[in-house]
Amino acid sequence: MDIYQLKYLVAIIESDYNISSAAKKLHVSQPALTQVIKKFETDEKIDLFIRQQGRLAGLTPQGESFYTNALNVIYHHERMMKELREHSTKARGKIRIGIPPLVLTVLFTDILSKLVISNPDIQFDIIEEGAFELQRLLRLQEIDFAVILQPTDLNSMHFKEEVIFVEEVCCFLSKDHTLAKIKNTMDWHDLKDQNLAIFSSTFMIHHQLMRKFESLNIVPKIALMSTSWDFLLESTLNSDFITVFPGPIRNHIVKDRIKEMKFTVPMPWKVVLTYPNKSHYSRIETYTRDSIYHYFQSNRPILPIQ
């Protein structure tokens, strides 16, 4: 029995043993399908099906075992052929990557442009959302990768996480702010009575800050929340607002007007690349994962897919 005949057998079983229905799905004649099954049972001297009044009604114990093995053979055959086709043709396709706006701005501007330029036949779709929405999209398989912060809410049995970047969060405030004039580092308790301008609750960093304040018994004085990092920075220029951002934002600030202050007790900002845990990844998925990981971890340049 070849792979096509195995598929005939599976189609009959999945059509509730209705040969006519299976024949229509397979685009073969009913007599031809009946002949395939009869010939196999005769040649192998085995009954795969239980028959009642000349009709197929179920599987014999041998048929049950054969069906299970047939599914396994078909799965591995299709996987083998898929991998073969991937490596025998020019890589084309689409990859969907979810990235929070802040992470996109401070970390991914350079690498994404290089991925796109190096691979004109691959479409890179970037979905900008907060971490919670990206985790939801990842679970629904609506994106292939998500770049989010640790800790995540993803089940380690179903999703992989690879740390690609580690920094610490820092305070950013006007150089005219009182604390900016008298201190070079910030203690968490220094923020107790300060007007804070922070990200809204759709961002993971918001919840990390709230947990930090709670652990120190600090009730933060939140004056402003927004989803726009540049607006939050601008809000500190002509006010006493203080905002808390990951350190890499320093590359996007007006340094002569805003002061960066690190915390005496650092809070890490860990960025992870997350994706489904599965037995097989397409050629484009493997390329994207490896390119992003090694770009950040070992400074490896972005090369075209091979």
Image (cartoon, rainbow, N blue to C red):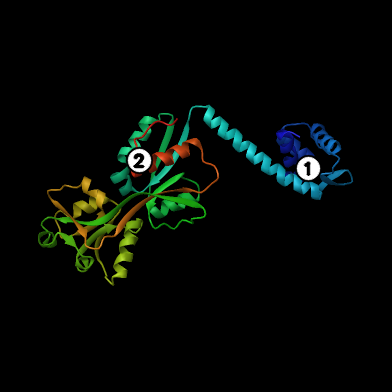
Which of the two residues, 95 or 158, is positioned nearer the viewer here?
158
Across and down, in percent, residue 289 comes to 43, 41
Position of 36 with respect to 143 (left or right) is right
Q: Is residue 7 left or right of residue 236?
A: right
* Disc number for residue 147: none
Residue placed most toward the observer, 110 or 300? 300
Image quarter (top left, top right, bottom left or bottom right) of the N terminus: top right
Q: Residue furthest front?
A: 298
SS of the residue at dot 1? loop
Mark closer to the observer (1, 2): 2
Q: Gap in Å between the C-alphas at discs 1 and 2? A: 55 Å
Give the residue number, with chain letter if any, for mark 2: 295
Most foreground residue, 158 or 210: 158
**x, y (%) of residue 261?**
18, 57
Q: Which residue is mark 1?
A: 18
Q: Of label 1 and label 2, which has the lower sequence position?
A: 1
Q: Residue at x 80, y 50 (%)?
A: 61
- Residue furthest right as drawn: 53
| Amino acid type, mark 1 | Asn
Question: How far across and down, in percent of the image, does residue 103 sit?
Answer: 32, 48
Residue most extreme to the top: 89
10 Å neighbourhood of mark 2: few (<14), some, or many (≥20)? Answer: some
Specify the amino acid type for callout 2: Tyr
Q: Position of residue 77 (x, y in %)?
A: 64, 36
For residue 4, which quarter of the picture?
top right
49 horizontally vs 298: left or right:
right
Residue plotted at (80% across, 31% down): 32
User: Regarding mark 2 in the picture, which secondary structure is present there?
Assistant: helix
